Image (cartoon, grey):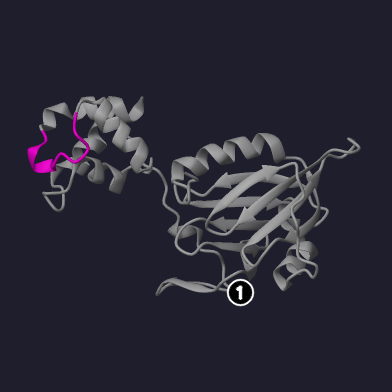
Amino acid sequence: MVKQRFTSLDLNCIVKNLRKKLCGLKVTNIYDLNGRTYLLKLVKTGEKGFKIFLILEAGTRIHSTSFLREKSDIPSVFTMKLRKHIRMKRLESIVQLGVDRVIDITFGSNESAFHVIVEFYAKGNIILTDHDYKILSLLRTYKHDDAHIISVNNKYPLDIIQTPKPITQQYMEEIMQNPEPPTISLRDLLAKHIPLGTEMLTHAVIEAGFPPKLKMSEFDKSKIPDILAAVLR
């Protein structure tokens, strides 16, 4: 079955792979495949005939391909914005923002840089910003909270990005001290605090010798080192 949503861990692996393939390549064109999916054509300077395509689909996927997909005959307004700002620029970096399901792709450098931010949570989004993260265009405007509205002319709120905490014995003891609710399962408690995805944490709990649905009220906390070792393995 095809995976419908990326976890934070999935994106971490994808970013590492794309970074090796794409950093240093130049964008020569951008196409829209539909209202949520965009294709970037990249080439390598000095290597005639080399080209690779990067597909961005808001909320769903990001990957490279060697094949040009069927594209719209008339480019959308968003596509024209992308062409105006990032065409003929070099892809300088691709990073995951904190442990969120958000990828930041930088084209160009210094004050001439632009960012294409792809969000993979909720309804998804693709956002174009300038070097200072001022939003120039985006697929959809939305309200993150009372203090942060994602819309044109606002700055993309990097301050809301989750940063990973080191997974240590002390951290494990802290999150297991007073679990809420007490009936929460061991796996679900870990998933609330450790951004590795449910599948990976289920595997870690089983590897440590516990049933994933074991309630925290029944968990022997002297076994925390076993859980820690399995998570870090």
**Residue 88, horizontal then vertical, whole percent:** 83, 53
Which secondary structure is most common in the magenta stretch? Answer: loop
Identify whether 217 is placed above or below 118: above
Identify whether 53 is placed above or below 123: above
Residue 74 horizontal side relative to residue 190, left or right? right
Q: Residue furthest front?
A: 1
226 falls in the magenta region: no
217 falls in the magenta region: yes
**Residue 55, horizontal then vertical, whole percent:** 67, 51
For residue 166, say whether it is visible: no
Q: Residue at x 70, y 61 (%)?
A: 33
**Residue 80, horizontal then vertical, whole percent:** 77, 68
Q: Residue at x 49, y 73 (%)?
A: 142
Q: Which residues are magenta?
A: 210-219
Q: Which residue is mark 1?
A: 152
Label 1 Cα neighbours within 10 Å, binned few <14 / some 14-19 / many ≥20: some
Quadrant (top left/top right/bottom left/bottom right) for the C terminus:
top left
Residue 88 horizontal side relative to residue 145, left or right? right
Could you tell me the amino acid type at mark 1? Val
Q: Residue at x 76, y 65 (%)?
A: 72
Residue 161 horizontal side relative to residue 211, left or right? right
For mark 1, give the secondary structure.
loop
Q: How many numbered discs, if any?
A: 1
